[in-house]
């Protein structure tokens, strides 16, 4: 079993064994235009090409595998998510033969809700601005005798997400910088753990929405800081605070947390579509938007990794954002 506290690289290696042949080993994508713009060698890890369209499948399948393998295996699982973790848990539960109930905000992207239902999960809606999703999910888990699998503050979830970073280092070797989106911290804590083991001189940079910089504030304060629900198009990063487990890893292993605004996210999505033909959702564009914002002054001559965390956005929604931002 994965440690209940901070994860180790051995936890990530065990997660990789579980995910072998189940999760996609996403490729490494490069872009000469982006390299020329930033003066660096840049390597994209496109988790929009992962099952369910986001990195979340890695952590969900690893965590649910632990549930299914456990001596006291629960009757099913409960999760709460705005969409990508919801889809990931729903698919992982179907593959492992577990019923799943997902607590989703009423304003979750319609495509994410439809996909979650399509994988066979039961949906319970809530208001993200007035209700506590964790409390709702915990009550359901208690009533049904299910296991609660949170989206980030869970050791097995963190370890599963770290396999994305481990694959990137295995494919391209050591890096100077690794940019990772930051919502609740599951992906960056896993990737930072992989970086410490596989590329110890790599600086891991977290990127948050400017309207939702709870991670940046927490790192500066040296303790968890909570904020109101962020008003941002990056729905996967509309988090009010990091988890205790993820923050512990971030404090030790993440060099810096920077922010980008929504207009920068749309510009980054447009740039990725034009230069790599990859469709990236707003949260998935946080890392590349952060790298673009730091520019050649910081990145020239460096080897840079960027995790593109997801691509669950409809072409119609992307077109709307491009028009609204006059890109």
Image (cartoon, helix red, strand yellow):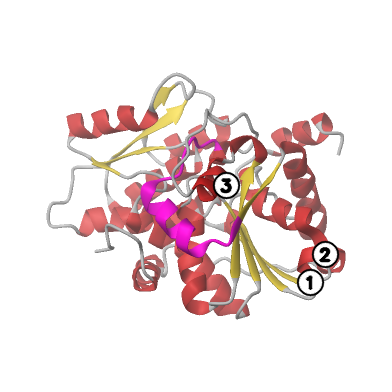
Please name the residue that numbered disc 1 is placed on: 40
Q: Tell me the residue at 52%/50% (across/down).
A: 219
Evaluate if marks 1 and 2 touch, with contact meaning CB atoms under 8 Å apart: yes
Q: Bin the neighbour count of mark 3 within 10 Å (Cα to Cα): few under 14, some 14-19, many 20 and up.
A: many
On screen, residue 40 versus residue 176, left or right, reads right
User: For this rendering, which residue is in front, 64 or 98?
Assistant: 64
The residue where tag 3 is placed is 216
Q: Earlier in the sequence, mark 1 or mark 2?
A: 1
Q: Residue at x 59, y 41 (%)?
A: 213
In the image, is residue 237 above or below residue 97?
A: above
Image side of residue 8 versus residue 287, left or right: left
**Secondary element at tag 3:** helix
Inter-mark Cα distance, 2 to 3: 23 Å
Neighbours of disc 2 within 10 Å: few (<14), some (14-19), many (20+): some
Quadrant where the image shows the C terminus: top right
| Residue 69, image quadrant | bottom left
Q: CA distance from mark 1 to mark 3?
A: 26 Å
Mark closer to the observer (1, 3): 3
Q: Which residue is mark 2?
A: 296
Q: Secondary structure at mark 2?
A: helix
């Amino acid at each position: 079993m994965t440690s209940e506290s901070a994860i180790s690289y051995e936890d990530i290696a065990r997660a990789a064994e579980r995910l072998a042949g189940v999760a996609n080993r996403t490729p490494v994508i490069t872009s000469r235009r982006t390299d020329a713009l930033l003066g660096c060698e840049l390597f994209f890890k496109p988790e929009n090409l992962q099952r369910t369209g986001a990195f979340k499948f890695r952590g969900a399948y690893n965590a649910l595998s632990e549930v299914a393998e456990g001596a006291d295996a629960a009757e099913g699982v409960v999760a709460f998510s705005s969409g990508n973790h919801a889809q990931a848990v729903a698919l992982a539960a179907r593959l492992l033969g577990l019923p799943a109930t997902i607590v989703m905000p009423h304003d979750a992207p319609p495509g994410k809700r439809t996909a979650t239902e399509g994988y066979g999960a039961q949906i319970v809606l809530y208001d993200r601005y007035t209700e506590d999703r964790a409390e709702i999910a915990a009550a359901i888990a208690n009533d049904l005798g299910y296991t609660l699998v949170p989206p980030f503050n869970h050791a097995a979830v963190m370890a599963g997400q770290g396999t994305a970073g481990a694959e990137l280092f295995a494919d391209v070797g050591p890096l100077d910088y690794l940019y990772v989106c930051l919502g609740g911290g599951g992906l960056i804590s896993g990737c930072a753990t992989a970086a410490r083991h596989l590329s110890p001189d790599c600086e891991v940079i977290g990127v948050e929405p400017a309207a939702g910089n709870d991670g940046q504030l927490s790192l500066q304060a040296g303790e968890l800081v909570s904020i109101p629900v962020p008003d941002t198009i990056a729905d996967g990063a509309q988090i009010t605070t990091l988890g205790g487990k993820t923050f512990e890893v971030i404090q030790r292993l993440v060099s810096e947390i920077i922010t980008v605004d929504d207009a920068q996210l749309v510009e980054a999505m447009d740039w990725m579509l034009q230069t790599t033909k990859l469709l990236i959702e707003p949260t998935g564009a946080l890392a590349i938007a952060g790298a673009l914002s730091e520019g050649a002054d910081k990145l020239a001559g460096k080897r840079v990794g960027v995790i593109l965390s997801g691509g669950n956005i409809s072409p119609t929604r992307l077109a709307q954002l491009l028009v609204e931002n006059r890109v």
